[in-house]
């Protein structure tokens, strides 16, 4: 088994700095960031639903048409609802983010152990602990935290991950 992990320092550092910038923007404008995320998800759902529906129309047999037509209709309708009612979408997204941050935190904590040979591995561990705490914070205050949580918490997570990547890349050999 390999004891060291080969890291492309420049790519990792550049990626880390990009995450830091995006995280700062999200923290400074949480309502904008949260709304942008929800609208983007709505657009993706709408486009995906239209694509599925069109694909269903191209199929010749009715038995094979039904699944893509129904799924495309449901997906497109969900996209329209999210775009039309972003506050409801934001509330649901906040709940999904709680689950995401909890799972991401656990994953970062576990995966940080594979970086123990690098001197900056503790930063990845710290980022995982922070993600886990953010997820638990959202979960405890849901749905009240929906208006600010998406932007602020995604921003903090991006900042944390970016800083950990910059530190890890600066200490990589």
Image (cartoon, rainbow, N blue to C red):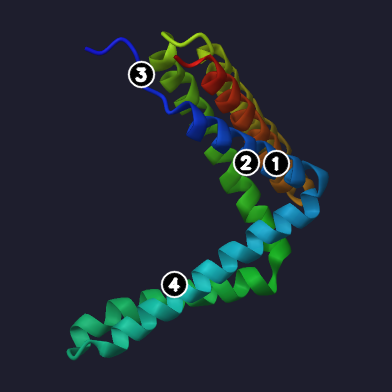
**Earlier sequence position, callout 3 versus callout 4:** 3
The structure residue drawn at horizontal position 44% and vertical position 14%, both measured from the top left corner, is: 173
**Pointer 1 residue:** 21
Looking at the image, is mark 2 or mark 4 nearer the viewer? 2
Mark 1 touches mark 3? (CB < 8 Å)? no
Vertical comparison of 164 with 145: above or below: above
Residue 169 placement (x, y as % from top left): 52, 22
CB within 8 Å, label 2 to label 1? yes
The residue nearer to you, when weighing 98 against 29, is 29
Disc 3 secondary structure class: loop
| Element carrying mark 1 | helix
The numbered disc on residue 18 is 2
Specify the label residue 5 is tagged with: 3
Q: Element at badge 4?
A: helix
Q: Hey, which quadrant is residue 154 in on the image?
A: top right
Q: Which residue is depicted at the point 69% across and 60% down?
A: 36
Numbered mark located on residue 48 in the image? 4
């Amino acid at each position: 088994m390999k004891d060291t992990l080969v890291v492309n320092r420049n790519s990792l550092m550049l990626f880390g700095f990009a995450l830091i910038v995006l995280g700062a923007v999200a923290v400074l404008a949480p309502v904008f960031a949260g709304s942008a995320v929800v609208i983007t998800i709505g657009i993706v759902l709408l486009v995906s639903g239209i694509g599925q529906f069109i694909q269903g129309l191209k199929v010749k047999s009715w038995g094979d048409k039904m699944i893509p037509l129904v799924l495309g209709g449901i997906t497109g309708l969900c996209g329209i609802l999210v775009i039309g009612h972003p506050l409801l979408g934001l509330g649901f997204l906040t709940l999904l983010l709680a689950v995401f941050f909890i799972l991401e935190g656990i994953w970062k904590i576990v995966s940080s152990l594979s970086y123990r040979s690098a001197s900056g591995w503790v930063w990845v561990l710290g980022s995982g602990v922070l993600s886990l705490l953010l997820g638990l914070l959202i979960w405890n205050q849901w749905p009240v935290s929906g208006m600010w949580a998406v932007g602020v918490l995604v921003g903090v997570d991006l900042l944390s991950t970016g800083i950990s990547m910059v530190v890890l890349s600066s200490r990589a050999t």
